[in-house]
Image: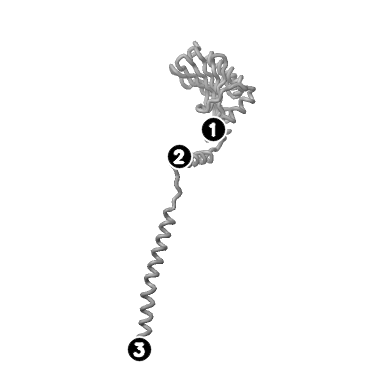
């Protein structure tokens, strides 16, 4: 009799405790569901800004050299005693007017550190195949803007025509030290409509 009473009490305890357990579990699930659905609201603009900033930060981290074209070019022009220029951010170049002609300057780079001097001539009548005329123009350009290797190689005759066409001529220039990671792109002369353009450039690799 005592044993039967004991089992009865145990059974009652189990059956009474079961609803509480189920209720507690349901409450816990509801709490968990609520916690899981609390998601910060991010607008489309904020998502774009985050993506842009992340991409920009990543690009900056991947840069080997200084990518501040405007700052580096401005400092370079100051060294050349050039104060009056227009900065074109879309081109990453500074423009200096010389009469009806324009000189473009650019310094900087992310994976390569480049240096560019480019002269745009308006209404120049000389054909781009006139090597003597154009090489003399390049020599003047390299002296005026201290592209010293170009002026040195031209004076020593260490250049050669690598390409010649109706619209462009390109001259290779000898590299005095292939081990220094300084690469010279050579001399490019381009006929663009009524204008002609001379470019000399170099970069660290």
Percent of width and height locating residue 174: 55, 25
Percent of width and height locating residue 34: 42, 56
Task: State the scheme by which the image is colored.
Answer: one colour
> In what quadrant of the picture does the C terminus appear?
top right
Q: Look at mark 3 in the image and give the residue it sits on.
A: 1
Q: Which marked residue is nearer to the observer: mark 2 or mark 3?
A: 3
User: Could you tell whether 180 is left or right of 11 in the image?
Assistant: right
Comparing 25 with 127, the one in front is 25
Please report whichever mark, 2 or 1, sits nearer to the chain's N-terminal start: 2
**In the image, residue 2 above or below residue 126:** below
Q: Rounded to the nearest whole Å, what is the CA distance between mark 2 and mark 3?
A: 77 Å
Helix, strand or loop status at disc 2: helix
Q: Which marked residue is nearer to the observer: mark 1 or mark 3?
A: 3
Q: Look at mark 1 in the image and give the residue it sits on.
A: 109
Q: Rounded to the nearest whole Å, what is the CA distance between mark 1 and mark 3?
A: 95 Å
Please report whichever mark, 2 or 3, sits nearer to the chain's N-terminal start: 3
Please report whichever mark, 1 or 3, sits nearer to the chain's N-terminal start: 3
Percent of width and height locating residue 186: 52, 24
């Amino acid at each position: 009799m005592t044993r039967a009473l004991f089992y009865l009490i145990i059974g009652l305890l189990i059956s009474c405790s079961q609803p509480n357990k189920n209720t507690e579990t349901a409450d816990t699930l509801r709490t968990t569901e609520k916690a899981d659905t609390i998601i910060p609201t991010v607008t489309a603009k904020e998502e774009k800004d985050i993506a842009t900033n992340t991409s920009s930060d990543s690009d900056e981290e991947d840069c080997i050299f200084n990518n501040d074209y405007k700052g580096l070019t401005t400092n370079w022009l100051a060294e050349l005693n050039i104060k009056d220029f227009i900065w074109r951010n879309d081109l990453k170049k500074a423009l200096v007017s010389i009469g009806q002609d324009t000189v473009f300057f650019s310094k900087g780079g992310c994976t390569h550190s480049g240096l560019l001097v480019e002269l745009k001539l308006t209404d120049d009548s000389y054909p781009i195949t006139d090597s003597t005329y154009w090489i003399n123009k390049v020599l003047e350009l390299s002296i005026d803007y201290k592209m010293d290797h170009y002026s040195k190689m031209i004076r020593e005759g260490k250049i050669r025509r690598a390409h010649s066409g109706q619209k462009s001529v390109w001259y290779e220039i000898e590299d005095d030290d292939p081990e220094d990671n300084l690469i010279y792109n050579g001399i490019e002369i381009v006929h663009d409509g009524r204008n002609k353009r001379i470019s000399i450039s170099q970069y660290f690799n």
